[in-house]
Image: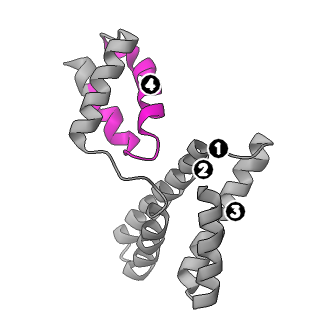
Amino acid sequence: MLEKRITEDMKNAMRSGDKVALSAIRMLKSALKDRQIELRRDLDEQEVLAVIGKQVKQRREAAEKYAEVGRADLQAGELREVEIYTAYLPEPLSESEVSDMLEQALQETGASSIKDMGQVMTAMRSRTQGRADMGLVSAMVKARLAG
C-alpha cells in the first residue's frame, strides 16, 4: 500500500540524514492524516493519490511564485519536494491517452455542449486521478465541447 511505502521512505530518509526528503515526507504524512481525520476513516488508494496530487500542485504554484519574486533558492526547494511527491504518483497519461478517455467520457455522458462540462469533468476526474493535470484536462474538455 502507498501509505506504507511513504512511511518506509520516511524511515529511510531519517537513516540517511536526507533532511529535505524527511521534511517533505513528514508534511505529506501530515496532509494525509488531516484528510483521514476530516473523513473520519482510513484513506483508500485514490484518496491518497488525490492528497499527493494536491501537494504537488501546491508546491508547483509556490515555486512559480518564488520564481516571480526572484527567490531561486526557495523555488529549488519547492521543486525538490515536487520530485519527492511525484515518485508516489502513477505514470502520467499521454495527451493521446487523455484524449481517448475524453471521447469515451463524452459518449458515456452524452455531453454535447459546454453546459455538460461538469458531467464530463466528473467522469474524467475518476479516470485520470493523479495521472493527469486536471487544468489541462479541463482545457481539453472545454475545447472539445465548445468546438
Read off the residue under disc 2: 48
Read off the residue under disc 1: 44
Q: Main secondary structure of the magenta part?
A: helix
Amino acid, disc 3: Ser
Read off the residue under disc 4: 123
Q: Do labels 1 and 3 touch, CB within 8 Å?
A: no
Provide the residue span drawn in magenta.
113-142
Secondary structure beneath disc 1? Answer: loop
Q: Closer to the camera, 120 or 6?
A: 6
Quadrant in the picture for the N terminus: bottom right
Secondary structure beneath disc 4? Answer: helix
Q: Residues within 10 Å of mark 1 (few under 14, many from 20)?
A: few
Of callouts 2 and 4, which one flags the residue occurring earlier in the amino acid sequence? 2
Residue 2's label in the rendered image is none
Of callouts 1 and 3, which one flags the residue occurring earlier in the amino acid sequence? 3
The x and y percentages for residue 23 are 61, 77
CA distance for labels 2 and 4? 19 Å
Q: Do labels 2 and 4 touch, CB within 8 Å?
A: no
The x and y percentages for residue 139 are 30, 34
Say if the magenta span includes residue 114: yes
CA distance for labels 4 and 1? 19 Å
Q: Do labels 2 and 1 touch, CB within 8 Å?
A: yes
Q: Do labels 3 and 4 touch, CB within 8 Å?
A: no
CA distance for labels 2 and 1? 6 Å
Of callouts 3 and 4, which one flags the residue occurring earlier in the amino acid sequence? 3
Residue 30's label in the rendered image is 3
CA distance for labels 1 and 3? 16 Å
Secondary structure beneath disc 2? Answer: helix
